[in-house]
Image: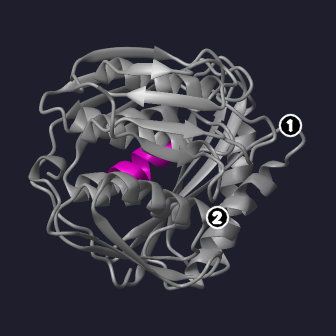
Amino acid sequence: MHEDIIQIDGSFGEGGGQILRTALSLSAITQTPFEIYNIRANRKVPGLSHQHLQAVNSTAQICNAEVVGNQLRSTDLKFYPGETQAGTYHFNIGTAGSVSLVLQTIFYPLSLANKPSSITIVGGTHVTHSPCVDYLKQQWLFFLKKIGFNAEIQTLKAGFYPRGGGEVLVKINPPSPQHPLWIEDRGKLIQVKGLSTVSNLDINIAHRQQLQAKKRFLGHNIPHEISLEEIPSYGKGTMLLLVGKFEHSQCCYFSLGAIGKRAETVADDACNEFFTFLKTRGTIDEYLADQLILPLALTKGTSQFITPRITQHLLTNMEIVKLFLPVTIDVSGTLNTEGIIKIAHSLQTPPSLIF
C-alpha cells in the first residue's frame, strides 16, 4: 500500500523543525508519503515540540493523512497523505509556539487545493526563532503575491512569549497565473517604512524604539517613516519592524523586546541587520531566502535572487525540496557569504504539481 516512501534524516544540515515542516507541505501537495527520523536532533530538546506537533496534526487534518509517531517529543514520524481539502479550519497550538511556522506548513497545500480556505491559528505571533506575523504580512506575503499566491492575513490578537494566546485569521484563495521571481538588482533605496509596537506596556517604550531608529536613519540621510501602534494581547511585549523599500525589491528585519532589554537596543538590533544588508548586493533578506525556496519550486519558469548570506537553513531546505520535486537549485557562493540562488524545473515536472 505504501511502497514508495521518502526517507529523511532529521539531523541533516540545519537539523531543526524546518526539515519536518517542508516535508509535510510537499508531502501533502505531491501526495508522497515520507518517514523522518532523528527529528530536531540538533536542538537542545530533540523531538516534536507543541508547535511541531501542531504542524503535523494540522497538515494531517487538511489532507486526511495517516500518521504514525505524532506524539510530543517523538523523534520518528511516518506520514501518509491523502488529498488536500480546502475549507474552514481552526488550530490551537496550546502554547506560545509559533503561529507563523504552523501557517507556512499548511499554506501551500491549501493554496493549491483549488477552492478558498479560511484558517484560524492560536498561539505565539511574536516569538523568538521564527518570523513574526507582521513579517509574514509585510514581507513573505508581499513576495508570494508577486509569484501568484493569493491570501490575506489578519492579526486578531497578538501572542508574545510566554503567554501566547495570539489569534490570526488567514483567508486563502486559489492562486493567479504564476510568475517566476527574477531579481538581479534591488535598485536604489527609496524609503524605510517601520512599525514600533507595544502591548500592555507604556507607549513610551514604543516611542523610544521609534526615536532610536529615526536617529540611526537620519545619521545616514535615509528617508524613513516609522509609525507607532498599541496592539492587544494577553501578555506583554514590544517589537520594531523595518521594511527597506528599493526600486526593484525590499528587505525586512525586526527585533523583539525582552525583560531587561532596553528599547534602544531593540531598535538597534533591527537597524544593525538592515545596515548590514545594505553593505551587500542582496536583493532579499536572508530570512526570506530560505522561505522562498518551496514556493518558487512550485512555480513554472526559472527564478533567481541574491541572498546577503547563505544560511544553513537555506541549504537544508533546498535539499528537502529536491527530495519531493524535480527541480534544479544552483547556489553561487558558500555558507555565510553572499550568494546567487537559481531555481529551475526539469522538463519532467508533472503539470499538476506546478501552477
Secondary structure under the numbered disc 2 in the rendered image: helix
Q: Residue at x 31, y 18 (%)?
A: 64
Position above or below: 36 against 218: above
The residue labelled by disc 1 is 259
- The x, y position of residue 190, in whole percent, is 41, 75
Q: Residue at x 74, y 50 (%)?
A: 208
| Residue 214, label in figure | 2
Amino acid under disc 1: Ile
Magenta range: 134-141
Q: Residues within 10 Å of mark 1 (few under 14, many from 20)?
A: few
Amino acid under disc 2: Lys
Which of 5 and 184 lies nearest the eye of the viewer?
5
Q: Residue at x 64, y 56 (%)?
A: 14
Position above or below: 29 against 311: above
Q: Quadrant of residue 114?
A: top left
- The x, y position of residue 85, in whole percent, is 21, 22
